[in-house]
Image (cartoon, grey):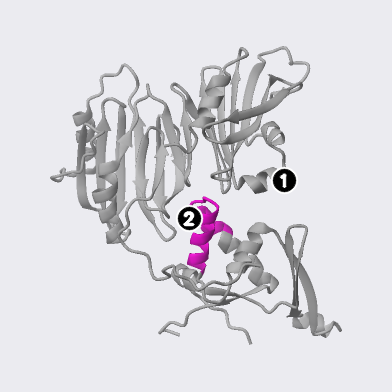
Amino acid sequence: MQEDAASTESSGPRSTSRLPRSEIAWAGWRMPVGEDWRPFKIEGGQARGSMMIGNGEQPIVRVQWSRAKEGNRFDAPAWIERRLKKIGAVPGANAPCPASLDRAAWVRDLATKGGTTRTIWYGYSAAARLMLELIVTSLTAEALRRDVFKSLVPRLKVSPPEAPSYWSVYGVGFACPVGFKLKQRHLYSGDIALRFEREKTSLLLRQVYPAGLAVSRRSASRWLRVGPFKERRRMRKAQNGPWRHASRKLEGVTQQGWKRLPPPLGFAAPRYSTAVAATDTALDRLLIAELQTRRPGDAATVAWAIERMNRG
Amino acid sequence: MSRRLNIDRRAALQACPARAPALRKEKKDGKLYVTVEFERPSWQRMLGAERLCKRTFGLDAYGREVYAYCNGKRPVEQIVRRFARSHNLSLAEAETAVTTFLKTLTAKGLVGIVVPRTDEE
């Protein structure tokens, strides 16, 4: 039994103004946030959606994103003008503009029908073809509102669709190769998974933690057989083997084989599954990646996805 | 008669859980078995049950860690932070896990929560 030691940690109220110590990355944007900030609600997908972010006490900021379609000649100033016209507001001066964005505007303390006010910030990146809208209401504590626009917005980054995308919530990070679009998400405490698709190829990225507990209840190869999402195809004969990544001290198992629909449709549209489940002993996490393709091969993509997990 | 306290989240995070006196503690197969004595509810006593009874609970490594932190001096918030740090968890996840577990420990009578008195009380 651990002895009770005199505590040296501060138990007083947390500082009202805090430096970013964590990060939320989603759908092509990434923003440093306070260490106790978390997504409350995520809606939409990669092309368009919104995320409400807050801490344990209150919602803080709503992030809305929308990606202009490829080939469209998107007019950012006109888009911002339309958004402002829609809410009947005049843009304020000195809108914070992160280095990764081309244009930004904001409306400060816009009165709402409920008697509160809200500040809306708009940003656009031509390279990423990404439009962002951040909304903070006066119901949020003033120190936090200040943090959003003084500390967080200037550090906001975006990634173009031609680059690998990075996804991070609850301190769990995934990198996804170019061209894949988010199809499903499974955000449970201790088990976070995202499934991406590119044409007929599917990529599952998953982290289960603490790994010690996860592996004590179910072996790594069994974790590969039981996915977080409902799947119609099943693997009949799998080739299993050890898997190791020397530089990151990752050890686990790899599994390959054809996944087929149940009989009598087994002949139709099979997918070749290449999967790895590896334990990251430093973080005590079980890292899982599975790629399903129409033809065998491409173990390198799976290894790349595993290696880049939690690497920013 | 017991009084139900209505406290906000911040006060709850500042409350200090303390281990109830255990009759026996035993380590076996990587688990810690804690035996505590508790008072049966009045309806059970009316049906003829004895006033006091013993119950044993098994705690795994994670449960043992949180149980060990409950010394009556360390607030819940600090336990959450320590747990998050020791297992590389985000504060949000650690808070959910630790507070849910403390609620279970309290319901089972293994831990009592010391809530700081405020001026309004």
Q: Which dot marks residue B91?
A: 2
Residue A183 visible (yes or no): no
The answer to whether residue A271 is magenta is no
Quarter where residue A264 is shown: top right
SS for tag 2?
Answer: helix
B56 in relation to B91, above or below? below
A295 in relation to A34, above or below? above
Disc 2 marks a residue whose amino acid type is Leu
Q: Residues within 10 Å of mark 1 (few under 14, many from 20)?
A: few
Nearest the camera: B47 or B54? B54
Q: Residue furthest front?
A: A246
Q: Position of residue A182 (x, y in %)?
A: 49, 30
A220 horizontally vs A105: left or right = right
Q: Position of residue B40 (x, y in %)?
A: 76, 80
Residue plotted at (54% across, 45% down)? A283
Q: Residues within 10 Å of mark 2 (few under 14, many from 20)?
A: many
Using the image, name the chain to which the residue with label 2 belongs.
Answer: B
Over which residues does the magenta segment extend?
B76-97
Quarter occupied by the C terminus of chain A: top left
The residue that disc 1 covers is: A217
A148 in relation to B60, above or below? above
A196 horizontally vs A17: left or right = right
Residue plotted at (57% across, 79% down)? B4
Q: CA distance from mark 1 to mark 2?
A: 24 Å
Residue plotted at (15% across, 46% down)? A92
